Amino acid sequence: MNILDKIVANKKEEVAAAKSKVSIKELKYYRHFTAPVASIKENLIKKKDFPVITEFKRQSPSKGIIHAGAKVAEIVPGYAKAGAAGISVLTDVQFFGGSNDDLSQARDLTDTPIIRKEFIIDPYQIYEAKAIGASAVLLIAAILEKQQAADLASLANYLGLEVLMEFHDESEAEMLNSYVDMAGINNRNLKTFEVDLQHAANMISLLPSHILPIAESGIHSADDFLFLKNAGFQGFLMGEYFMKHSDPAKACADLKAEVTGKSVTQL
């Protein structure tokens, strides 16, 4: 089994356990379930000079520990102040060291739209995302069947959540459906974890014009950012680059200053 297979196998067990503890009916009574949320897609379009979705994550299977002991309260408000168009929060426990509580805490600390970054394979996780305060969900094409992806995306839209669908190769483009708001092309192969920015630049032409193109993973400099922006990307999901710094929010502000040509004090 590759790492993605291992994550999905574990996720099936996690979801089964979660269902046995809290029903969908109970999730609908969570305080965030009926709360309005802002649109990440609209925010990315609005903040076109620096359409970045920052990310809160402590570790990953490919990099190990990225930011040990990272606390939501110390990082997420800074991301918002630095001008992030959205914030991605990892909720996977075993492989990324995240939790649902991380996302709920982030929601209480900022009005910036939040993506639940998770390995979603079951409708229950969509209801859960809404209940913990997400504005949008990530759907990974590589782990879903076509009809399954459509059903999950449709449910997300029904609950008022936007959908970011992630792709890794040309064959997965057929997974796109009318419920998808944003399409993320991952520069990192989730099976080998190798990174290639040219891969995303080559794939962007496969996306329909009405779906906002997002570049994901492996963006580590202003040059990387500008290369992908010039290739046509209108959004950037960046996690490791910021989180590996002792002050992720400052790293975000510094990158924004570099790519926009404005000093940090002008931002």
Image (cartoon, rainbow, N blue to C red):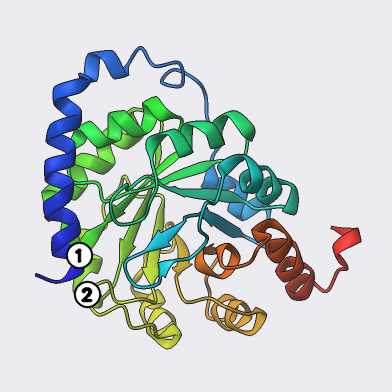
Q: Which residue carries the number 2 mark?
A: 191
In screen coordinates, is 196 left or right of 231? left
- Which residue shows up at 33% across the image and 61% down it? 166
- Say if 150 sits above or below 253 in the image: above
Residue 162 spot, x, y in % from top left: 41, 41
- Say if 156 sits above or below 159 in the image: below
- Which residue shows up at 25% across the image and 67% down it? 173
- Do tag 1 and tag 2 residues touch (Cβ < 8 Å)? yes
Nearer the observer, 84 or 194: 194
Residue 67 spot, x, y in % from top left: 52, 61
How far, Cα to Cα, is label 1 from label 2?
6 Å
Nearer the observer, 160 or 125: 125
Nearer the observer, 53 or 177: 53
Displayed quadrant of residue 61 = bottom left
Placement of the C terminus among the 4 image quadrants? bottom right
Sequence-first tag of 1 and 2: 1
**Kind of residue indicated by mark 2:** Lys
In screen coordinates, is 225 left or right of 259? left
- State the residue lying farthest toward the front: 69
**Kind of residue indicated by mark 1:** Leu
Nearer the observer, 237 or 76: 76
Q: Could you say whether the residue bearing mark 2 is in a helix, strand or loop?
A: loop
Q: Which residue carries the number 1 mark?
A: 4
Residue 49 can be seen, yes or no? no
